Amino acid sequence: MPCSSRDLDHSKLVELMKEYDIVISTVGPFYIYEPPIVKAAIEAKVRAIIDICDDHSPTEEILGLDEEAKRKWCTCVGEIWMAPGIKQSFGPILL
């Protein structure tokens, strides 16, 4: 179901996401919207959240949610965009 940044009330977003197995997020700017969207998806226990976020700081914050996502069986697939391979956001993390 399409939604916009106007729909980012956390509790409403969680309720909306509970109806779906997979959530695809393209809502930007990512440094504002991506962490709350991923947190809502994890809380809603969706099977997967896929995003096109290509900003370093929200990506790092999302990686910090790994344990919680695993506990709720939610797979987070980030930075699915135009750049091939491992994006620049992962460079500092991998080093």
Image: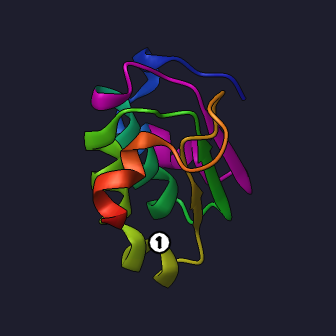
Q: Position of residue 53 (x, y in %)?
A: 48, 34
Q: Is residue 43 above or below residue 50?
A: below
**Left or right of 95 in this view: 39:** right
Q: Position of residue 36 (x, y in %)?
A: 34, 42
- Quadrant holding the N terminus: top right
- Which residue type carries mark 1? Ala
Query: Which residue is nearer to you in this view: 84 or 44?
Result: 84
Q: Position of residue 44 (x, y in %)?
A: 52, 59
Residue in the image at 36% along x and 33% along y? 55
Residue in the image at 38% along x and 28% along y? 30
The question of residue 35 being in magenta is answered with no
**Left or right of 33 in this view: 71:** right
Q: Position of residue 91 (x, y in %)?
A: 37, 53
Q: Is residue 42 above or below residue 2?
A: below
Quadrant for residue 56, please give it. top left
- Quadrant holding the C terminus: bottom left
| Magenta residues (range) | 13-31
Instruction: Label 1: state its secondary structure.
Output: helix
**Left or right of 35 in this view: 46:** right
Residue furthest out toward the front: 95
Residue furthest out toward the bottom: 71
Query: Which residue is nearer to you in this view: 90 or 62?
Result: 90
Would you call the spot at circle 1 few (<14 residues within 10 Å), some (14-19), or many (20 or more)? many
For the image, the number of numbered tags is 1
Residue in the image at 50% along x and 23% along y? 27
Q: Which residue is mark 1?
A: 69
